[in-house]
Image (cartoon, grey):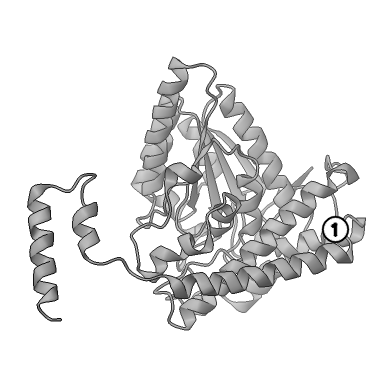
Amino acid sequence: MTELIDRPQLTADLSVGPREALQFVDSSGALRPDAPLDGTQAGKVRALYRDMVLARQFDSEAYNLQRQGELGLWLSCRGQEAAQVGSIRALRDSDHVFPSYREQAAALCRGITPAELLTQWRGTAHGGWDPAEYRFHIYSLVLATQLLHATGYALGVAADRRKNPDLDEIVMCYFGDGAASQGDASEALNWAAVTGAPIVFFCQNNQWAISTPSAAQSRTPLHVRAAGFGLNPTLVDGNDVLAVHAATTAAAERVRAGGPPELIEAVTYRMAGHSTSDDPARYRDNDEVQLWESRDPLARVRRLLDDTGWADENFYVALDSEAAALSTATRSACLSLEPSPLEATFRNTYVEETSALRAEREQFTTWKESFA
C-alpha cells in the first residue's frame, strides 16, 4: 500500500524527504499487491477517471481560449487532476471548500459551470459563482490568504457544532507548496491546531512555486512541518487518484469525528507553466518534464482500467463524446460572457447601496449618456 518516495524516485533534483507515501496504483498503472481494491470498485474507478478526463478537457479548452485572446489569463491544472478529483470526491456536499486559483477539476466536481469558472478570467466579474450554493469559495489570487479564510470559517463551523452536535460539516483548504512559505500559511496551520478547528489542509506539492523549486523553499518537507504545528500529517502520491481518495476519506472522517486538524501533502507536478504568462522552459529541463509525463495521472488510470477489464470500448466512446460536448459548451459559454455595466460597481460595493453611492451612480449614468 505504500511506496518509498525519495529523491531518486521523484527526480534527480527534487525531494520531499524520505518517507513512505500512500500509493495504490504505481506509475505503470498496476495495482500494488496490498492495495485494498478489487472489481467491486470498478464503478468508482470509472467515475473518478471520467472526472479527470472532463477536467483536462475543460482545462485544455480554457488554455486555448486564453491563447486566442478570449481570456486574460489562465492557470492550468494539467497534471494535478488526480489530486483534485480524488480529494474533492472524498468529501460530503455539505463540507465547505476553499480553493486557491487552479482548482478547476475540483470545482467541476462540485457542479460549478464552465461559464462561472471563466467569468473571472474573462474579466466580466470579480468572482463567478455563489460560494454558499456550491459550498466552494471563490478563487483566492493572493498567495495563502485562503488558509486564513478557511481556518476562520472552520472556527465558525466548530461554534455551530458545539450548539448542535448533530452537525458534522468540516472544511477543506487547497494550497500549493509555494503558498506554504507564506506567513499566512504558518499562522493558519498554527491557529487551526491550537483551536482544534475541523479542517483538512490539502497541499498540492507540484514541485514549483512559479520558478522556485520546492527544494529551495524549505529544508523540511511540509508534512513534517505540519506535525510540528500539531496537525496530523499524511503523505500521498498525488498522481494516484485512488490513494488520494483513500487518504482524504480517512482524514475527513477523523476530523469529522472530532480529531485534530489534518494536513495532506500530495506529491504531484504542474505540467504547464505557472500561468499562461509564464515560460517554464526557462527554469526546468525537458528530462524532468518527461519523467513526470510518464507519471501522468490520467494515463495511469486508463492503463488500470484496460488491464483489469473494468471499462469497455462503449465507456470510452461515450466519455469521448461527453468531453467533446464539454469543449463546445465551454467555448460557447466563454464567448457569451459580457461585462456588467459599470453602474453595477456602485450597487455592489455594499449589500445595500448607500445614498451617496446612488447619487454617484446617477451622476455617472448621466455623464455616460451624454456621449450618446
Count the marks.
Answer: 1
x 38%, y 54%: residue: 143
x 11%, y 53%: residue: 357
Q: Nearer the viewer, residue 160 or 124?
A: 124
Looking at the rendering, which quadrant does residue 141 occupy? Answer: bottom left
Looking at the rendering, which quadrant does residue 188 occupy? Answer: top left
User: Can you give x and y, in whole percent of width and height, for residue 224 in the image?
Assistant: 55, 40
x 7%, y 51%: residue: 356
The residue that disc 1 covers is 305
Instruction: Please state which amino acid type lies under the numbered disc 1.
Output: Leu
x 79%, y 42%: residue: 1
Q: Nearer the viewer, residue 127 or 82?
A: 127
Q: Tell me if residue 20 can be seen.
A: no
User: Can you give x and y, in whole percent of width and height, for residue 347 in the image?
Assistant: 21, 54
Q: Nearer the viewer, residue 28 or 126?
A: 126
Secondary element at image label 1: helix
User: Relative to 11, does residue 38 appear above or below in the rendering?
Assistant: above
Q: Is residue 37 left or right of residue 114?
A: right
Q: Tell me if residue 371 can be seen.
A: yes
User: Relative to 129, does residue 295 appear above or below in the rendering?
Assistant: below
Callout 1: 10 Å neighbours few (<14), some, many (20+)? Answer: some
